Amino acid sequence: MSEKNYDIIIIGGGPGGYVAAIRAGQLGLKTLVVEKEKLGGICLNWGCIPTKALLKNAEVFETLKHAEDFGFSFENLKVDFSKAIKRSRDISGRLSKGIEFLLKKNKVEYISGSAKIISKGVVEVTQSGKVENINAKNIIIATGARPRSVPGITIDRKQVITSSEAMILNEVPKRLIIIGAGAIGVEFAYFYNTYGSKITLIEMMPSIIPVEDKEVSKTLSRIFQKNGIEILTETKVESIKTGSEVTVSISSKDGKKDIVGDIALVAIGVQGNIENLGLEEVGIKTEKSFIKVDEFYKTNVDGIFAIGDVNGPPWLAHVASSEGVVCVEKIAGKNPPKIDYSAIPGCTYSQPQIASVGLTEEKAIEKGYQIKIGRYQFRSHGKAMAMNETEGFVKLIFDEKYGELLGAHIIGPEATEMIAELTIAKTLEATAEQIHRTIHAHPTLTEGIAEAAMDAYGESIHQ
């Protein structure tokens, strides 16, 4: 580096950090990214992308199991689990290199090393044992989060593992106990169940994927149980013992018992990566391992910002990226709109897929809305039948008074792709009539959205 002064130093090169850096480069700000591991962060290297590669493998395997439905038959199907893992890792490797290219393209400098804020406007950077202080008008912390552990339980990363180890196992465990039935737990339950593991899914809340609409949770539970997954809700993990096997001691309204497996996967949430950043020395306020920020992601210290998972929920890559763009644009003196957190889509990539935006039915009622609900079942949908994927439904929730879309929930084929239309509708305060009067191409899965909107007012044509 020829100079040691920057407009922005970004600590962390994940989906928040690298996107913020690219936007800063576009705006002509002299920018440096410091990342101690691989560019792309957890999302690209150990989360969003590589897990979706694994889940695609499971989806293909599941299709092959039902090949006769499509008129195919074969003998001695060979399954190479190691190739599924390798494909996932190769994809991550290619994408990480691609990010480095994008940083160079946008004139963003990059250091592979660690960073610590030593005072306002000064960052200590350590690279290959060499330490130097670098000045910046603004500092953005984008260090993300890591899996949280059950209190009193040791994650040894061999028998008691996190999602990172679950992505690179040498072989399929015969018995896998998954603690936590949020998106991560559910996705791995689907993946390993498809490959033949006996799955026990444990959740403290009354339902799996507890943030989703109750109808969606019930439907996924039914499908999972039909596929042989054991589900234990309202169940607390008391302890885990390792040895020749893993023994998970649980308690519920039915009493206490032990569950024995080969591996236990802990997937109960995340905690912010706030250690060794100099936050205490500088006086940056934190709460429960997350950095406190205002609506434009500024901390309580002028010139220091925090974006993405490190500033708290929702812990989603697309939220981190959006926060990065807004934060940088605000630093650059522009007037970016604040992020509307009521219109953030959430996706779970099991089969069937789940996607949602806005309020659940329960939350809408809790907030005092008089609501109208429209549903459309995929079992009566021509395109879904053609795909041989007829499980699930579209559920739309509207404000009865104005007809405005309050929430949208999909469980079924390609739900994670379909949610984009409804996120736009929610953002634009679209009504049921505007949605169903929008002509949807035939045959497409998204016709189910129009039908659900019509159903809210008793006008559905095809159900």
Image (cartoon, rainbow, N blue to C red):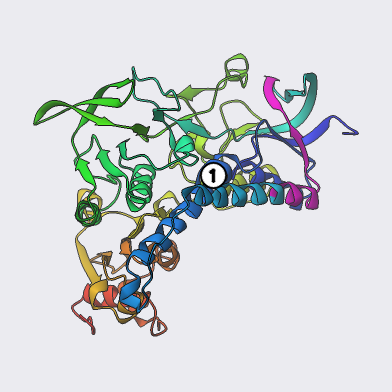
Picture quarter with the C terminus: bottom left
Work out whether residue 318 can be spotted: no
Q: Does residue 150 appear left or right of residue 135 in this picture?
A: left
* Residue nearer the viewer, 203 or 455: 203
Q: At 39% from the left edge and 62% from the top edge, which residue is drawn?
A: 76
List the single residue furthest toward the left.
254
Q: Which residues are magenta?
A: 99-118
The x, y position of residue 410, in whole percent, is: 32, 62
* Numbered disc 1: secondary structure: helix
Q: Does residue 266 appear left or right of residue 286 in this picture?
A: left
Q: At 51% from the left edge and 47% from the top edge, which residue is drawn?
A: 82
Q: How many numbered marks are there?
A: 1
Q: Is residue 294 above or below residue 358?
A: above
Q: Residues within 10 Å of mark 1 (few under 14, many from 20)?
A: many
Q: At 8% from the left edge and 31% from the top edge, which residue is drawn?
A: 254
The x, y position of residue 98, in whole percent, is: 70, 51
Residue marked by disc 1: 43
> Residue flagged by tag 1: what amino acid is it?
Cys
Q: Is residue 416 above or below residue 90?
A: below
* Residue nearer the viewer, 387 or 322: 387
